[in-house]
Amino acid sequence: MINIEERITIHRPIEEVFTYMTDLRNTPEWQSGLLEVQQTTEGPVGIGTTYQAVRRFLSRKMESTLKIVGYEPNSSLTWKTVSSPMPFTTAWHFKSTAEGTQVIWTFEAEVGIFGLADRFVANSIKRDAVAGFGTLKDMLESKVIAAA
């Protein structure tokens, strides 16, 4: 089992950060390994919304179906894989602070196809996430993206 937690503070209002991040179709803009995300259900994001995601991880192309299993406006978003070579659950928790918005990311995965290499896989996932959150912070703080 892999368990990771990271925190980042983004100097933007919680509503803006939450709206942008919880539309998972935006994640390829700031997560380098994520090639494509398509919403496969209609309507606004909420519990039950599904996505098809394609990512490159450890030189392998991986396709996953993701399902939103927790959603609280301006507070949290949790999703898990419905089909994936590596089953995982991830959550973003949002907290308004004097500096802007703190995002707490948690990630839990079954090792699955990677077996004994779980420490290497965990380090790679964490390194990619930290880099992605740095890109996200820069994007949102410089207003490169349009807030909804």
Image (tube, rainbow, N blue to C red):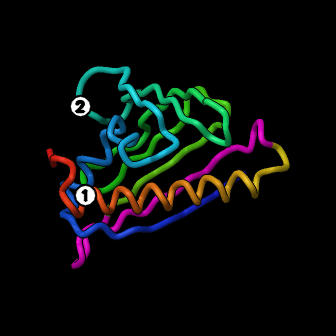
The amino acid beneath tag 1 is Leu
Kindly identify which residue carries mark 1: 140
Point 57% across, 26% down: residue: 63
* Magenta-colored segment: predominant secondary structure: strand
Q: Give the vertical position of 72 relative to 6 (above or below).
A: above
27 or 4: nearer the viewer: 27
Vertical arrangement, residue 30 with respect to residue 119, above or below:
above
Residue 82 place in picture, x, y as percent: 55, 28
The residue sitting at the bottom extreme is 98
Q: Residue at x 38, y 26 (%)?
A: 38
Task: Mark 1 vs mark 2: give the one in front.
Answer: 1
Q: Position of residue 104 (x, y in %)?
A: 43, 63
Examine the image and state in which quarter residue 12 appears.
Answer: bottom left
Which residue is at the front of the view, 120 or 69? 120
The region drawn magenta spans 95-114
Does the magenta segment cover residue 122? no
Residue displayed at 44% across by 38% down: 69
Residue 44, numbered circle: 2
Vertical placement of 102 versus 72: above or below?
Answer: below
**SS of the residue under disc 2:** loop
Task: Name the secondary structure under disc 1.
Answer: helix
Give the crowd class for mark 2: few <14, some 14-19, many >=20 residues within 10 Å: few
Q: Residues within 10 Å of mark 1 (few under 14, many from 20)?
A: some
Direction from residue 15 to residue 89 in the image, left or right: right
Measured in 3D between alpha carbons, the distance from the residue under mark 1 to the one under mark 2, in whole angstroms, is: 22 Å
Residue 44 located left or right of residue 2? left
Residue type at mark 2: give it: Pro
Where's the C terminus, which quadrant? top left
**107 lies above or below 26:** below
Between discs 1 and 2, the one toward the N terminus: 2
